[in-house]
Image (tube, rainbow, N blue to C red):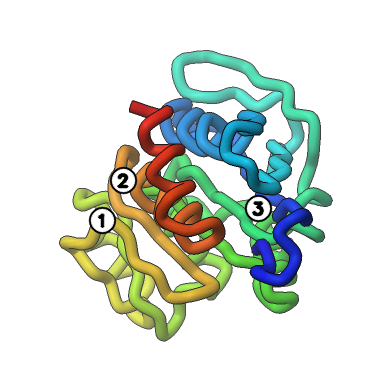
Amino acid sequence: MPSPHDPHTPPTVAIAACHGQGLFEFGCAVGLFAPIRPELDVAWYTTQVCAAEPGPLRMLGGTQVQLPYGLEALEHADTIVVPGWRDPAERPPQVLLDALIRAHQRGARITSICSGAFVLAWAGLLDGRSATTHWRLTDTLAREFPNVRVRENALYVDEGSIITSAGSATGMDMMLHLVRKDYGARVANLVAERLV
């Protein structure tokens, strides 16, 4: 995350996608973090879009995407976005869970959009924390991961280094919240205006 003492060092965001990825959540994350934004006059994020499974990734709708990075991008990212998960009942690949655990241990901020909360739960990162996910999945999250304090009516839940958002579109609210935390309200408002 950007340091208030070093405004010229851009923080790194890694967006970790898997097979069966929803394009909307993935596109929201890429659309918010990846564009170059010289008009903001800040050291904007450096974004790495990575495949958390061997690619090309088969996304929803039959789309195939070849991403430029693998899980090594998580090793140095300041913020990691998990934009959904294909099946709450399916344990994510252990290599992804291990990469998220290591990133969290070194102080990275880990975020999820919609069903991506299940990836964080499988990694144990939500144990003892409040979290949210899509309203249709909150009961499942609470039942399968009883150590998680599930908040059913929240757009997003900020637990400091772990931030989860509810349904797909609320991911944008959560990510604008990250921008506000990192760069302040002025920049967050400008980014929001450009996304409208």
Q: Answer with left or right where residue 17 lies relative to residue 49.
A: left
Front tag of 1 and 3: 1
Mark 1 = which residue?
A: 155
Marks 1 and 2 close (CB-CB < 8 Å): yes
Residue 132 makes an appearance in the image? yes
Mark 3 = which residue?
A: 93
Q: Answer with left or right where residue 170 lies relative to residue 102.
A: left
- What residue sits 71% from the left and 71% below the top? 5
- What residue sits 43% from the left and 45% below the top? 87
Residue closest to the eye, 136 or 5: 5
Mark 2 = which residue?
A: 170
| Disc on the earlier residue, 1 or 2 | 1
Name the spot of residue 18 as percent of width and height, x first: 60, 38
Q: Amino acid at mark 3?
A: Pro
SS for dot 3: loop
Q: Answer with left or right where residue 40 lies relative to residue 163.
A: right
| Disc on the earlier residue, 1 or 3 | 3
Q: Quadrant of the N terminus?
A: bottom right
Q: What is the C-alpha distance between the residues marked 1 and 2?
A: 6 Å
Please identify the quarter of the rendering in which residue 66 is found: top right
Neighbor class of circle 3 (other Cα within 10 Å; few <14, some 14-19, many 20+) is few
| Disc on the earlier residue, 2 or 3 | 3
For the view shown, which residue lies furthest in the bottom direction?
A: 128
Please identify the quarter of the rendering in which residue 8 is found: bottom right
Front tag of 2 and 3: 2
Residue closest to the eye, 193 or 166: 193
